[in-house]
Image (cartoon, coloured by chain):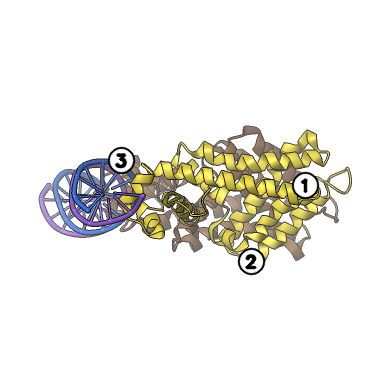
Chain colours: A brown, B yellow, C purple, D blue
Amino acid sequence: MSNTKSTRDHIIEAADHLFYQQGYEHTSFADIADAVKISRGNFYYHFKTKDDILNAVINLRVANTQNMLDQWEIEGQSPEERIRHFIQILIKNQSKIMRYGCPVGTLSTELAKMSHSAQTDATRLFTLFRTWLAQQFTSLGHSADADDLAMHLLARSQGVATLANAFRDENYIEQEVTLMNEWLKSYTVNAAPHTQ
Amino acid sequence: MSNTKSTRDHIIEAADHLFYQQGYEHTSFADIADAVKISRGNFYYHFKTKDDILNAVINLRVANTQNMLDQWEIEGQSPEERIRHFIQILIKNQSKIMRYGCPVGTLSTELAKMSHSAQTDATRLFTLFRTWLAQQFTSLGHSADADDLAMHLLARSQGVATLANAFRDENYIEQEVTLMNEWLKSYTVNAAPHTQ
DNA sequence: GTCTATACGCCGATAGAC
DNA sequence: GTCTATCGGCGTATAGAC
C-alpha cells in the first residue's frame, strides 16, 4: 500500500519493457540490472532464475491487461464502443507497435519457438482479450459465434501489428483500423453481417 | 547443375529449418553442425559469421518464394484462383504453422527485436507476396486499391498464423480460410465489395 | 574440405562480505 | 538488501593438422 516501489517492482517493470523491446532471450540479466541500476548479484536476491522474472512479467501484464479491460467495461457506453476501445489501442500504441510489434503476440511467438514452459501462461494474455471480446459480441446479440468474432478481430489486430512492424508504415495501421471499425459497424447497425 | 548437393547447400537447408523451428538466435552453430553431421570447425570454411548463414537462408527463401509465386502464376487460371493459392498455404502448412507460426512473419519479428541489420532483407519476403498479390488484385480490376487489398490479405493470414500458433487450434485456421475466401469472392463476383 | 583443439567473451547462477 | 568476486557452461570464432 506504500507509494514507493520496491526494488523487486523496479526489476519487473524494467524486464517488462526490455522483454518487449528486445525479446526475452535477447535480454540479459546485465541489461535489466543496468536499467534498474543495481548489481547483477543483487538480482538473485529477488529472482532465483530467469524464468522467475519471466513469470513475474507475465503476471504483471495479466494484471495490467485485466485493469485495462475493466476500465473499458466502465468507460464504454455500449458493447460496440467497448470493442472500439480494443481496436483503438492499435492507434494509441502506434509508434511502439511499429518499432516492437504487439507485446502479446511477439512474446507468445518467441516462447513457442523456444518451446518454453511459460508459453501457456503467455497465451493467457490472449485469452483475456478473447474472452472479453466474446462477451461484448454476445452482448451485441451474436452469442452463437461470439468467440469466432473475437478470434477474428484478434487475428486482424495481430496481423496489422506484424506488418506495421515489418514495413514501418505510419498510415497502414490507421487504414486497417478504419476497416476494422467498419467491419464492427456491420455487426451492430443491422442484424445481417457481411461475410467479414 | 549437378544433382548432388554441396555441403554448403546442406548447411543452408538445415539452418533454414532450424531458424524456422527454433528461431535465429536460439539456434547455435552446434545445432546446425549436428543436423548436417559435420564438425563445428568445418562450418567456418563455408560461412565466416552467423550473419552470413542468415543471409544465405534469406536468399534461399526469397528464391523458393519466387518459384512458388511463378508456379501459382502458371497454375492459376484466373487472378482469384491465384489468390486462392495464396490463402490455401495456410491449409497446406497447417501443422507447421500451428507449431512454429509463419516463417516470414516470425523471422521478421525476431530480427526487428534484435535490431538486426538483415531485417530489411527479411522484409523482402513480405514484399514478394505483397507485390504479387497487388498484381492479382489489379488484374481483378481493383488497380486503385490493389496494394491496400494485398496488405489486408497479408495481415489476415499473418494474424491467423499467430493465433493458430498461440492456441494450437486445428479448426481455427480452416474457419478463417473460409472467411478469407468469402472475402475474396466479394471482390470477384460483383463490382461492389463489402467493407472487408 | 574436413577435422581437432582451443581462445575468448558473455550469460546464468552462486558464495560470501558488508 | 546490496554489493564484489567468481564459477561453469555455452556460443561464436580462430588456428592449424590432416
Which amino acid, by three-letter code, is at mark 3?
A: Lys
Label 1: how many Cα within 10 Å (few below 14, some 14–19, many 20+): many
The disc at residue A37 is 3
| SS for callout 3 | loop
| Viewer-nearest residue: B132 or A115 | B132
- On the image, the x and y values in percent for residue A22 come to 44, 44
Question: Which residue is denoted by mark 1 in the rendering?
Answer: B196
| In the rendered image, the vertical position of residue C7 relative to residue A69, given as above or below | above
Closer to viewer: mark 1 or mark 2: 2
- On the image, the x and y values in percent for residue A82 come to 68, 50
Which amino acid, by three-letter code, is at mark 2?
A: Glu
Residue at 45 percent of width and 52 percent of height: B15
| SS for callout 1 | loop
Closer to viewer: mark 2 or mark 3: 2
Question: Which residue is denoted by mark 2 in the rendering?
Answer: B170
Residue at 73 percent of width and 39 percent of height: B134
Q: Disc 3 is attached to a residue of which chain?
A: A
| Viewer-nearest residue: C1 or B169 | C1
